[in-house]
Image: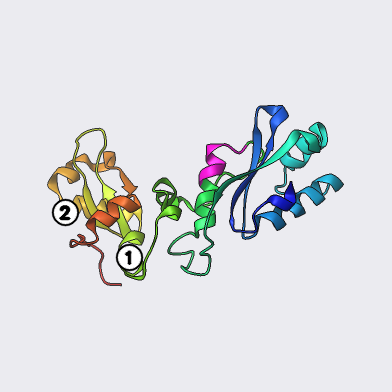
Amino acid sequence: MIDYLPTESGVYAIVNVSADGARYVGKAKNIRNRIKTHVHDLDLGLEATNDARLLQTAWSAYGRESFTIEILERVADNENAVPYSIRADNLSLAEHYYINERGEYNADKKIVRSDQVFLVNAFAWREPVDADTVARALTAVPYAYIVGSRILFEHAVLVSAFNETEAKQKARDHSPELRMLDKKLSSVRASLEMIRTHLGAELPDYRETR
């Protein structure tokens, strides 16, 4: 079965069919080679995908005949295209999504930094990105926040700030209504789709020169 696995990059799952489909999710630049390594180590009892050794424990308990391999999604590897400090790579974004969808044998569910989870929610790894989009998105996305209360009123303001705390403060300074909310003000990172709708317009920017 391993010989028929693709040599492309993507996200895969090692699935325990005897345990209601419990699975380990991983990413690889070459899926076939990565799975070969997994199986070799699992058969020898040497697999250490995490300190808890969740996958190895299940493999040893149920036996290799209880497991199958699933290709969850072929994902283009762009690790060297964009600095991770600006945008997580495609494989990491996709892996984060599938682990959080279901990954009983994954001890670590936080693959992508918290400030970049909005890219996961927007399925950004599936979006074609040309040079012009990259140039504009990288200018806007790292600093874009939607600020407002999702409970007390419906509208929100889109601001640019270096972090969430600054975004809230800039919003208070900008709007008397927001200032009245004081500590009840909340902010969330804008989704990639929401940012793109503003790329053609002037993005309100309250950052001070640093």
**Which residue is at 49% across, 64% downward?**
84
98 up-or-down from 141: above or below: above
Measured in 3D between alpha carbons, the distance from the residue under mark 2 to the one under mark 1, in whole angstroms, is 29 Å
> Residue furthest toward the left?
176
Magenta stretch: helix, strand or loop mostly: helix
Crowdedness near tag 1: few (<14), some (14–19) or many (≥20) residues, C-alpha within 10 Å: few
Closest to the observer, 84 or 129: 129
Among numbered discs 2 and 1, the one appearing first in the sequence: 1
Of badges 2 and 1, nearer the viewer stands: 1
> 49 and 74: which one is in front?
74
Q: The residue tagged with tag 2: helix, strand or loop? A: helix
Query: Which residue corresponds to the image point at 66% horizontal and 27% vertical from the top-left?
Result: 20
Circles 2, 1 touching at the beta carbon (< 8 Å) = no
Vertical comparison of 82 with 158: above or below: below
Q: Please state the horizontal and vertical placement of residue 170, each as a whole percent of the image.
A: 23, 55
Mark 2: few/some/many CA within 10 Å (<14, 14-19, 20+): some
Count of all numbered marks drawn on residues in the image:
2
Residue 92, x across and y down, in percent: 54, 54
Q: Amino acid at mark 2?
A: His
Side of 194 relative to 114 (left or right): left
Q: Which residues are magenta?
A: 97-103
Q: Is residue 23 left or right of residue 114?
A: right
**On residue 133, which mark appears?**
1
Q: Residue type at mark 1? A: Thr
Which labelled disc corresponds to residue 174? Answer: 2
